[in-house]
Image: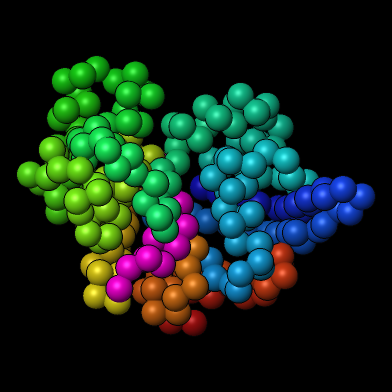
C-alpha cells in the first residue's frame, strides 16, 4: 500500500540546512496496525506528515498503491489526502462550539456529499465508536475519551484508506487510553482499516502488530508482533 524509498527531508532555517530524515525505507501493507515510536525530535511527526500527504517537499520516492506520488503536484497531493487519509490528533482538534454531528459531518461536507447521505453516515460512525445518541452534544461538555471518539468518528466518516493517529492517547488517563486503543484495534480487525500510530507510550505500541523505531531521523528497528 505504502512504499517509501530513500526518503530524505531537510529544513532550512536562515543559513542553516537541517537534515531531519535520513534515507527512510519503509513499507506498510493494507490492514496493518503500525506504531511509530521515538523520542521527541526524532523525526516521527515529519515522517507521518510525508506519509499522510501533508508534506510534498522531500527527496526520494513514495509509491502509494503503486502510484509514484513523489511526482505529484501540490494540488494532486491535496486531492490524494482528502480522499485517502483520516487524521486523529492528541488534542482532538474539534470545533468545541459545534455539535458532535456537525464535527463528524465536516469532512463529508468538504467531499460534497448529499445532506441525507451525510446524516446517515454520521449516525453510522457515531454508532461505531460507541457514541450513538450524542449527536447534539457539544465537545466542550464531553470527557477527553469521548472527544477522542468523536475525532475518530470524524476521521473514518469518509471511508479513508488509512488512518494516521498522532499520539491519540497522549492526553488521556490509562483506563481511557485503553478504551481508545480497543476502538482502534476493533476498527483495524473488523473494518481492515490500516492504522499508522505515533506514540510515546510503550504499552500502546506493544498492542500494535508492528513497531517502527526512529532515532535521529533514521529507522533503527522494525519489528512485528512476536518477533
Q: Nearer the viewer, residue 172 or 159?
A: 172
Residue at the bottom extreme, as displayed: 227
Q: Is residue 43 left or right of residue 93?
A: right
User: Does residue 54 sit above or below 109 in this rendering?
Assistant: below
Q: Is residue 4 left or right of residue 207?
A: right
Whole-percent x and y of residue 221?
Answer: 62, 75
Q: Is residue 71 left or right of residue 113?
A: right
Q: Residue at x 65, y 28 (%)?
A: 74
Q: Nearer the viewer, residue 200 or 66?
A: 200
Whole-percent x and y of residue 108?
Answer: 31, 28
Q: Residue at x 60, y 26 (%)?
A: 76
Q: Is residue 183 left or right of residue 204?
A: left
Q: Residue at x 45, y 62 (%)?
A: 167
| Magenta stretch, residue numbers | 161-173
Q: Residue at x 45, y 41 (%)?
A: 85
The answer to whether residue 30 shows anywhere in this view is no
- Asked if residue 170 is among those painted magenta in the image, a careful observer would answer yes
Amino acid at each position: 500500500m505504502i512504499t517509501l524509498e530513500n526518503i530524505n527531508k531537510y529544513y532550512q532555517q536562515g543559513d542553516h540546512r537541517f537534515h531531519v530524515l535520513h534515507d527512510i525505507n519503509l513499507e506498510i501493507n493494507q490492514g496493518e496496525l503500525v506504531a511509530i515510536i521515538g523520542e521527541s525530535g526524532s523525526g516521527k511527526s515529519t515522517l507521518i506528515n510525508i506519509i499522510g500527504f501533508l508534506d510534498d517537499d522531500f527527496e526520494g520516492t513514495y509509491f502509494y498503491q503503486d502510484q509514484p506520488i513523489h511526482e505529484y503536484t501540490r494540488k494532486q497531493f491535496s486531492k490524494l489526502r482528502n480522499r485517502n487519509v483520516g487524521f486523529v490528533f492528541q488534542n482532538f482538534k474539534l470545533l468545541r462550539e459545534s455539535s458532535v454531528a456537525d464535527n463528524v459531518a465536516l469532512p463529508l461536507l468538504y467531499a460534497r456529499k448529499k445532506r441525507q447521505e451525510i446524516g446517515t453516515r454520521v449516525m453510522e460512525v457515531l454508532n461505531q465508536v460507541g457514541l450513538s445518541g450524542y449527536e447534539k452534544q457539544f465537545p466542550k461538555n464531553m470527557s477527553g475519551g469521548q472527544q477522542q471518539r468523536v475525532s475518530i468518528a470524524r476521521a473514518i466518516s469518509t471511508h479513508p484508506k488509512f488512518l494516521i493517529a498522532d499520539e491519540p492517547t497522549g492526553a488521556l488517563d490509562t483506563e481511557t487510553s485503553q478504551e481508545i486503543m480497543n476502538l482502534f484495534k476493533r476498527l483495524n480487525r473488523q473494518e481492515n482499516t490500516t492504522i499508522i500510530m505515533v506514540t510515546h507510550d510503550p504499552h500502546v505500541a506493544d498492542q500494535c502488530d508492528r513497531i517502527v523505531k526512529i532515532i535521529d531521523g533514521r529507522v533503527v528497528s522494525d519489528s512485528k508482533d512476536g518477533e
